[in-house]
Amino acid sequence: MSQLQPLNWRPFILGGLASCTAEFGTFPIDTTKTRLQVQGQIAIEDAKFKQVKYRGMLHAFIKITQEEGLKALYSGIAPAILRQASYGTIKIGTYYSLKRAFTDNPGEKESLAVNLFCGMAAGVISSSIANPTDVLKVRMQAQGLACMGNGSMMGAFMTIAQQEGTRGLWRGVGPTAQRAAVVAGVLLSVYDWSKSKVLESKVLEDTVFTHFICSFVAGLAGTVASNPIDVVKTRMMNQRALKNNQNASTIYKNSCDCLIKTARHEGVKSLYRGFIPNWLRLGPWNIIFFITYEQLKRLNL
């Protein structure tokens, strides 16, 4: 491990900017993924989430647009951008700061194990802090504007806190942190490692095309590894438990219970529900993010 170096704020700032750009560009796909993941819950009493309304990503996209309008595809965009402004900023900044603590020259002789550890740590820290914004985003995507009542985004946060307690804002933080550890660990480590190997081999130069190829591979790897956790996270965040009645609408006690019940009642295949929109979102998200991040780095802001 190298000596402690002064904190570099550029990865935090550039990471936040690139994350917000990628989030806005891929958000409608994320909405269809969320709707697919919360439907077909046999163990739940709410008929809205029991029925299988959408047959796939394209069908969900069309049906949501027809029944609720194009605006519904961006339901939850405000907390999503707020989430990326916090989560993305902390995640990327922490990741590259940790890498600098292990090596004097990140990018040279990349270690997949070190990158994986730094990515997982960054994912857990950032997702835990940003969890309230993720809760509101998921509920707005699954339930539409109904979960906000007639209030603003900040009013929705206050409503959740008043009705469900502070724990309501950190509902699903366990599976969220687990997913973030897997996603950030796999995505960031695979991208940096594959990029270093490509540049070492001199097959490609450090260009936008190289960033595209490496981010595509990283996106596929991250989706395969994280989809079951993502299903659990979405379902945990979508359920409510009022302060005065902790058992109300609480189908899943924790992430492990949710994983077991989902697999038992709906089959293991259900853990990969929403895989295609998840990949089609995570893949483009990473491509936009890494290309934007790499270009911002070259501006020497």
Image: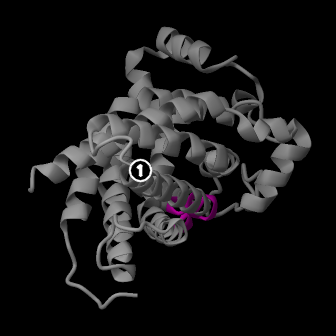
Residue 168 sits inside the magenta stretch:
yes
Residue 195 sits inside the magenta stretch:
no
Residue range of the region highlighted in magenta in the rendering: 165-177
Residue 99 in picture, x, y percent from top left: 38, 73
Tell me if 120 is positioned left or right of 291 in this view.
Answer: right
Number of numbered callouts drawn: 1
Q: Amino acid at mark 1?
A: Ser
Which is more toward the observer, 260 or 141? Answer: 260
Tell me if 244 is positioned left or right of 123 in this view.
Answer: right
- Circle 1 packing at 10 Å, graded few (<14), some (14-19), many (20+), is few
**Residue at point 51%, 41% (across, down):** 217
Q: Quadrant of residue 80?
A: top left
Query: Is residue 153 depicted above or below 140 in this figure?
Result: below
Residue 278 in picture, x, y percent from top left: 57, 35
Which is more toward the observer, 141 or 231? Answer: 231
**Residue at point 85%, 53% (across, down):** 260
Q: Quadrant of residue 71?
A: top left
Residue 115 seen in the figure: yes
Which residue is tagged 1? 201
Residue 255 in picture, x, y percent from top left: 72, 59
Assign a secondary structure to mark 1. Answer: helix
Colour logic: one colour
**Residue at point 37%, 36% (across, down):** 212
Residue 201 in picture, x, y percent from top left: 41, 50
Query: Is residue 70 depicted above or below 99 in this figure?
Result: above
Helix, strand or loop: magenta stretch: helix
